[in-house]
Image (cartoon, rainbow, N blue to C red):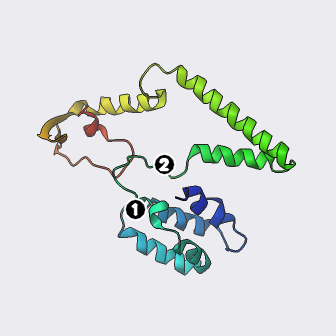
Amino acid sequence: MQSIDTVLGTRIITSKKIRSGLALKQTLWEAARATIIPWFPSIINKLKEDNEEAWKWLDDKPPGHWSKSYFSTYFKCDILANNLYEAFNKSIVKARDNPILSMLQMIRKNLMVRMANRRVAALKWKGVVGPRIEKIIDKLKKGSEICLATLAGDMKYQVQHLYRGRGVCSRLSSYPNSPLISDF
């Protein structure tokens, strides 16, 4: 499976064969962030009108590998680019001017230090999840105080906002909204 960086990041935007620009980049990210399949074709058609070379290059890449509209709703992560890939690419740029062995040693050292620092930081966590996620959950819990969750069976709940009445509380991905947090 190709990474999102392969399709969206450096390959298509910086390819010398494909004329690029801000409009191309924005249209490409719009296609990647489209959340439902019916929106995807219209955005791709816009890309075809704007830059047929980019469209041809992208057309043979399965959208399930790079467009949110084709992602499974089972996995609840909406991150399109991975920080580890970005850090790796950054270390390559810094080391690129060195001879091959020096370059590989520099990349290895940078990644080793980065992972060691992350490991040390993770050992300091007091909870089950990291401190950033814990803050987000706490903030959402405060917003859920005005919601009432009623078990409907099979781990399904009806969530009622106390002032607005019954609400539909679902998202394709990302963090759950405050009414959903009230279930926990």
Report helix, strand or loop for mark 1: helix
The part of the image, by quadrant, that contains residue 17 is bottom right
Please give left or right for residue 126 compared with residue 73 in the image.
Answer: right
Q: At label 1, which amino acid type do we have?
A: Ser
Residue at 69%, 68% in the rendered image: 15
Residue nearest the observer in this picture, 166 or 151:
151
For marks 2 and 1, the one nearer the N-term is 1
| Amino acid type at image mark 2 | Ile
Question: Observer-nearest residue: 152 or 101?
Answer: 101
x then y, percent, for residue 53: 61, 78
As drawn, is 151 to the left or to the right of 56? left
Q: Position of residue 145 (x, y in %)?
A: 24, 30
What residue is rendered at 55% in x and 76% in y? 55
Outermost front residue: 101
Q: How many marks?
A: 2
Q: Residues within 10 Å of mark 2 (few under 14, many from 20)?
A: few
Identify which residue, 146 or 14, lies in the foreground: 14
Judged left or right of residue 148, residue 65 is right
Q: Looking at this view, name the residue that lies furthest to the right.
A: 99
Q: Which residue in the structure is indicated by mark 2?
A: 79
